[in-house]
């Protein structure tokens, strides 16, 4: 993959399944006529201490002595003349990358929320006001109910309230069951565990697919080869481990490329089976 350190570089025309010319803050992919961009919000030193049940021997096996990086990303999808965001992070560097792609907050049509943690919805508001004046907000009903009713989070409550009747909830399907498109070419899949309503999104156009996995992984270096290891951030660690293995197995068996909110740039790749776990092969 070609990296360019010049921010805001003009993207070249993409061909199916091949990365375009990129900056170090943006990775891109195309399926059919759907353009997918991973926008990096921030990158910092990673902390393997968030992993539950990972002993020193396991960490030494997979974590370099020099350490590793942790990334926070969002995804921008251009499809059918629409601009769709998947999460917003905190609305910093990723929004600057979005502007470089000629996408303004006013031109965003929909925002799909994987879950309601602050590093995924912090960019919805600025000075208490909606950043996206025309966008509809979509999130799972379970996620909405938990964070606004069962165990209210004031940040989530305020962010959603600011969008009023532009907030729409849905019931995601489950792998192996009935799946229903939320928007043309975009299907939500239940991935409960990290949070009660955590959702991943399957993108599809012209028979090609891509899966945005949200917070399925926090320390990819360990959780690909040992998917049964969860993080302290996972509210139901047992359920999170089970759906992690399920999603990675689906991606490997069906050769569906994935991208995640905490996967380090370029943040997209093909999943392959590797013993009792998996490995990621970066897209080329």
Image: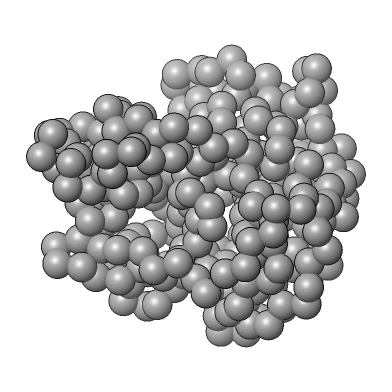
Q: Whole-percent x and y of residue 232?
A: 30, 28
Q: Whole-percent x and y of residue 30?
A: 64, 73
Query: Height in image: 211 above or below 114?
Result: below
Query: Height in image: 94 above or below 249?
Result: above
Coloring scheme used? one colour
Which of 35 and 19 lies nearest the eye of the viewer?
19
Q: Quadrant of the N terminus?
A: bottom right
Q: Residue at x 21, y 32 (%)?
A: 52
Q: Quadrant of residue 53?
A: top left
Q: Whole-percent x and y of residue 34?
A: 69, 72
Which of 152 and 53 lies nearest the eye of the viewer?
53
Which of 122 and 93 lies nearest the eye of the viewer?
93
Q: Residue at x 68, y 82 (%)?
A: 15
Q: Residue at x 78, y 73 (%)?
A: 12
Which of 69 and 141 lies nearest the eye of the viewer?
69
The residue sitting at the front extreme is 66
Tell me: 274 left or right of 97.
left
Q: Residue at x 63, y 39 (%)?
A: 41
Q: Quadrant of residue 159?
A: top right
Tell me: 129 left or right of 272.
right
Can residue 139 be spotted in the picture?
Answer: no
Q: Whole-percent x and y of residue 97?
A: 75, 47
Query: Height in image: 193 above or below 38?
Result: above
């Amino acid at each position: 993959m070609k990296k360019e350190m010049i921010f805001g570089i003009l993207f070249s025309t993409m061909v199916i399944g091949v990365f375009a010319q990129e900056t170090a803050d943006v990775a891109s992919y195309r399926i059919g006529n759907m353009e997918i961009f991973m926008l990096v919000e921030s990158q910092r030193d990673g902390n393997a201490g968030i992993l539950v049940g990972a002993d020193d021997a396991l960490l030494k096996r997979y974590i370099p002595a020099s350490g590793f990086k942790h990334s926070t990303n969002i995804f921008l999808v251009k499809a059918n003349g629409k601009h769709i965001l998947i999460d917003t992070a905190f609305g910093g560097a990723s929004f600057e990358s979005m502007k470089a792609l000629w996408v303004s907050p006013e031109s965003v049509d929909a925002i799909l929320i994987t879950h309601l943690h602050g590093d995924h919805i912090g960019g919805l508001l600025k000075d208490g006001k909606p950043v996206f004046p025309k966008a509809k907000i979509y999130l799972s009903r379970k996620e909405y109910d938990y964070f606004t009713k069962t165990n209210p989070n004031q940040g989530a409550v305020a962010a959603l309230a600011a969008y009023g009747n532009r907030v729409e909830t849905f019931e995601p399907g489950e792998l192996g069951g009935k799946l229903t498109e939320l928007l043309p070419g975009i299907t939500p899949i239940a991935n409960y565990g990290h949070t009660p309503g955590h959702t991943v999104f399957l993108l599809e156009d012209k028979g090609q697919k891509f899966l945005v996995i949200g917070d399925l992984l926090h320390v990819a270096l360990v959780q690909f080869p040992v998917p049964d290891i969860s993080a302290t951030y996972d509210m139901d660690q047992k359920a999170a481990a089970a759906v992690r293995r399920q999603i990675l197995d689906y991606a490997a068996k069906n050769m569906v490329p994935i991208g995640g909110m905490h996967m380090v740039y370029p943040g997209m790749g093909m999943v392959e089976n590797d013993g009792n776990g998996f490995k990621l092969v970066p897209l080329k």
